[in-house]
Amino acid sequence: MANKSVWSDNRFWQRTAAWVTGFASILLIWLTFDTSAQISMGNDADLKNGVTKRVPGPTVINYKISYEMSTKRGHEVPYIGGNDGKGGSLFKEKEKFFGRDDYSEKEAADLLHLGKLGSQAKNCMDCHTLMGNGAYYAPDLTKAWLDPAWGPEGSMQAVTGKSTKEEAMAEFLQHPNLYPTHARMMPNLGITAQEAKGLVAFLKHLSSIDTNGFPRNFGKMQGALNGK
Amino acid sequence: MANNYLKSESKQLATWYFTFAAIIFGAQLVFGLVAAIQFVMPSFLYQILDFSIARILHINALVVWMVFAMFGSVYWLLPDETEIETVGIKIGKLLFWVFAAAIVVVVLVFLFIQVGPADQTTIWFITEGREYIEAPRWADIGIVVVALGFVANLFLTGIKGKQTGIVTVLMADMIAFSGLYLAGMFFTDNISVDQYWWWWVIHLWVEATWEVFVGAIAAYGLIKMLGAHRQVVEMWLWIEVSMLFGSGILGMGHHYFWIGTPEYWWEIGALFSALEPLPLVAMFVHVLYDWGKTQGAQEAHHEKVSVIKNRPAFTWFVLNAFGNFLGAGVWGFFHTLPQINLYTHGTQFTAAHGHLAFFGAYATILIGMFYLAVQGKNGIKVMKSTKLSIWSTSMITGGVMGMTVALTIAGYVQVIVERAQMGATWSGYFDSQSGAWFTQAMDWRLLMGVITFLGFVLLATDLLRTGKSAIHER
């Protein structure tokens, strides 16, 4: 056996497989610890103290959220409570959500919990995408809260007969079959008023998550049809 | 059964798994057709069997039939590899019925209850609503119990009998495969954490443990169908395992570009997932090289007969080598770099990749295993292709290729109109979906889906009939 090359030795390749797999797994686990710390949900104190979290606390629903280009990062990022002009959030500007901007940590967390449960109980991801993951039968919801269609410049408030973004969204979610926007219509999923409120809170919170600039150029080119 | 050549109970159990898998395979295609029709005609079954439900059933049926066929494949090859009867076969049979019954209940609930109120009872009993693994929590626990029983049988048999390289790889692979499912069994309000762990199930299944499983099955098939040299085959298998896990485990980073996770995943995901096609090239070379080598050795002795002991199965194994490389490798590489993925993520591009990858990497080789089982069950020495098997193979392969091309074109439209121009808004999305290129692509996809389904009907007929055909050498 002295002349046999190591390259044609099964034991050698078996050990290689074990070492490579072990090394990759350990690296993945190490990165998981780092990532887990970075994506843990923030809290109300973070928002009040101006601490930027990749996933802000539920009380982010008390604040105005925008999605703007950051020259520092080279892509769009969510700004919470205004833009400080230096690539960070200001955490100052509030925004009423169903008439209030003083949701307590517990109230906001309960709403988000209800919304996240609702997003699963109604199989949202099997038509829509959330952060790009899901099915491709309906629009991506990552930044749905910031979609111009629901804002004062869009049509959905008039269509649903509501005067705020959150009320228009909640109304649509409860009776989507009454408000067609395309031949492909969302079915009525029996969403209650409270569940709809939770889902809108979930969507508002979702829009505040730092997704490294996905989706790109969101809503910046309205009406740019046919390459014009 | 009157004419059953199977002496091994393990192989008999394998045929149960294969039969159930083939039925669910058919169901997968039926619900896929429903979803494809809805893209063309949105009012079809609106508020009766909506797209979301059709899609859940389409993809869950896909996962379930493949898992059944994978379990079946292991029960099939264990007696050949270990040279003993599988340990705990009675429990294996019981678990088969538990698994099958659970699947039927889950499907009926998906079909007739569909959604529930936003509380934990829905998560436990109706749907977990997490893409691909929607099965409610009670079924999750059932799946874990069944998988543990299966892994126990595999380990006890592997330890007691002859432990070949193939069995060793399968033992390591199947315990990882079962264990990873646990990562998909919890609820959290934090969607970034949710998706982080969700990918541990989805990605580490289909881009790591399942691929290694395919490597092991291909190795078994080459030895079984060609009489390829075990030492060479197993050496290749270990190289493939190194390359698959070496690229696939950290290749998971390509799912962590946009879900709230830090930027360093761009580099890690790009580098390792770009390497993912390499082992698929290796597997492709491996299959064709061994084929040429054994055939060449035979012809050196002036014998002109084919070395292939099972033509239809070997055809599917070769299609696996091509399809895995094309569908998983090339179509995956198209959009794996973050600069491109920023625009293609979550579009029909992904659907195109998904269709060709699952077909090319998994459906092909598992259909090949169906044919090996038909051969074994009917005591056939050399199995030939019938007209039906050639037609069904051509129609299924052509149909899936056609769907893939159609979806790729639809993906281009969506990327350019919705993503590049309109920035992924609600109106941008529907503008992309209304373009002529998109709607025509969806018409073609439906047509190709129908061809695939007809091909499946021929395949099922062939699997039922060919065992009794007189053309085979017995």
Image (cartoon, rainbow, N blue to C red):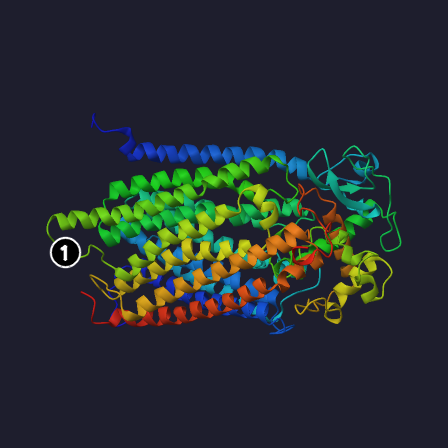
Foreground pick, B352 / B8: B352
Q: Position of residue A200 (x, y in %)?
A: 77, 56
Q: Position of residue B337 (x, y in %)?
A: 54, 42
Q: Quadrant of residue A225?
A: bottom right
Q: Quadrant of residue B70?
A: bottom left
Q: Position of residue A61 (x, y in %)?
A: 81, 48
* Residue A153 as seen in the image, left or right of residue B212: right
The single residue placed furthest to the left in the displayed view is B302
What residue sits 60% from the left and 34% below the top?
A: B264
Q: Quadrant of residue B117?
A: bottom right
Give the residue pinned by disc 1: B304
Q: Secondary structure at mark 1?
A: loop
What residue sits 25% from the left and 59% below the top?
A: B310
Foreground pick, A79 / A70: A70
Tell me the amino acid under the disc marked 1. Lys
Q: In the rendered structure, the residue with mark 1 lies on which chain?
A: B
Q: Is residue B258 visible?
A: yes
User: Image height check: is A56 above or below A222?
Assistant: above
The single residue placed furthest to the front in the displayed view is A228
What residue sits 67% from the left and 70% below the top?
A: A183
The single residue placed furthest to the top in the displayed view is A2
Q: Is residue A130 visible?
A: no
Image quadrant holding the C terminus of chain B, namely bottom left
Image quadrant holding the N terminus of chain B, namely bottom left
* Residue A73 as seen in the image, left or right of residue B85: right
Counting labels gives: 1
Q: Residues within 10 Å of mark 1 (few under 14, many from 20)?
A: few
* Residue A187 as seen in the image, left or right of residue A59: left
Q: Position of residue A62 (x, y in %)?
A: 84, 47
